[in-house]
Amino acid sequence: MSTPRPTILKIGGSVITDKDEELAARTAVINRLSEEIQEAGIQDLIVVHGGGSFGHPLAQKYGIKEGFKEEAQKIGFSETHHIMTVLNGLFMDSLIWHNIPAVSITPSSCVITENGRIKSFEDTALRTLLKMGFLPVLYGDAVLDTKLGFTILSGDQLVATLASQFDAKRIVIGVDVDGLYDSDPKANKAAKMLTHLTLGELKKLHSGLGKSTTRDVTGGMFGKVSELLFAIEQGIPVTIVNATEPNLVCKALKGDNVKSTVIEKE
């Protein structure tokens, strides 16, 4: 039994948490997204979610992304990892309550990075879950690093790696804006939304994208786009959609035409 080509859905931390208030989960949004995943009925789906106001404040407080430098950071690593399991647990509760056979995969137990980049990813369990018809759910996490001791693995880097290793059919990215803009729409009201981009056009735009104005140790939209380049180069199309708007994630998963930014290799 071969591993199916999955669709990968990334839900940003800014969608499922209030990033202006620590440990503020948007449970109503999480439940709606679970309903949309259930309604879409997509087989061979992998979900990855971000940390938002759960993982990012702690990671920033203890400097986890920069690596192990002092003993006091150890408790920070533990806290950051643990609080991400709490947020993941809220998402898992909702998915299972909606009769979705979701199974959490803890990145820190199967991923090792080197200078912040994924070096090894033991994906045997994940492949088996997919073959059996389960929905694997992963998330941004504090992980061990061969050079730094430990660091932060963003959900976005995880998405690109999963897409490559599993030869994904496509990637759907759920964020808190309508798509990709030529500048930060939260800071610039004149920002222009881009509905379709080729890889070449994206690379030209890339250097002009601003960093997130909210607290985000993984680089905001700038970081998301940087990570996606690798997957797009391999011919995996990406759809960026506003996951705070009802039904858009469901429609995007089903391949319906929705307001979004679509990025393709050519």
Image (tube, rainbow, N blue to C red):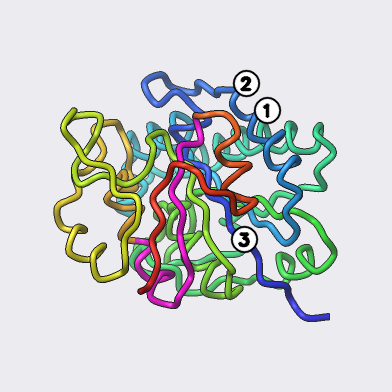
Could you say which is closer to the camera, residue 123 or residue 42? 42
What amino acid type should be assigned to the residue bearing mark 1?
Asn
Determine the CA span between mark 3 and mark 1.
20 Å
Nearest to N terminus: mark 3 or mark 1? 3
Q: Nearer the viewer, mark 3 or mark 2?
A: 3
Q: Are marks 2 and 1 in contact (CB under 8 Å)?
A: yes
Could you say which is closer to the camera, residue 233 or residue 53? 233
Which quadrant would the C terminus be assigned to in this image?
A: bottom left
User: Badge 3: few (under 14), some or many (20 or more) residues near its Cα, within 10 Å?
Assistant: many
What amino acid type should be assigned to the residue bearing mark 3?
Thr
Res 238 label: none
Res 28 label: 2
Which quadrant would the N terminus be assigned to in this image?
A: bottom right
* Left or right relative to 207: residue 143: right
- At numbered mark 1, what does the secondary structure look like: helix, strand or loop? helix
- At numbered mark 3, what does the secondary structure look like: helix, strand or loop? strand
* Left or right relative to 83: residue 216: left
Res 7 label: 3
**Residue where numbered disc 1 is placed:** 31
Q: Are marks 3 and 1 in contact (CB under 8 Å)?
A: no
Vertical placement of residue 26 versus 59, above or below: above
Q: Is residue 136 visible?
A: yes
Q: Tell me which corner region of the image, top left, top right, bottom left or bottom right, holds residue 100.
A: top right
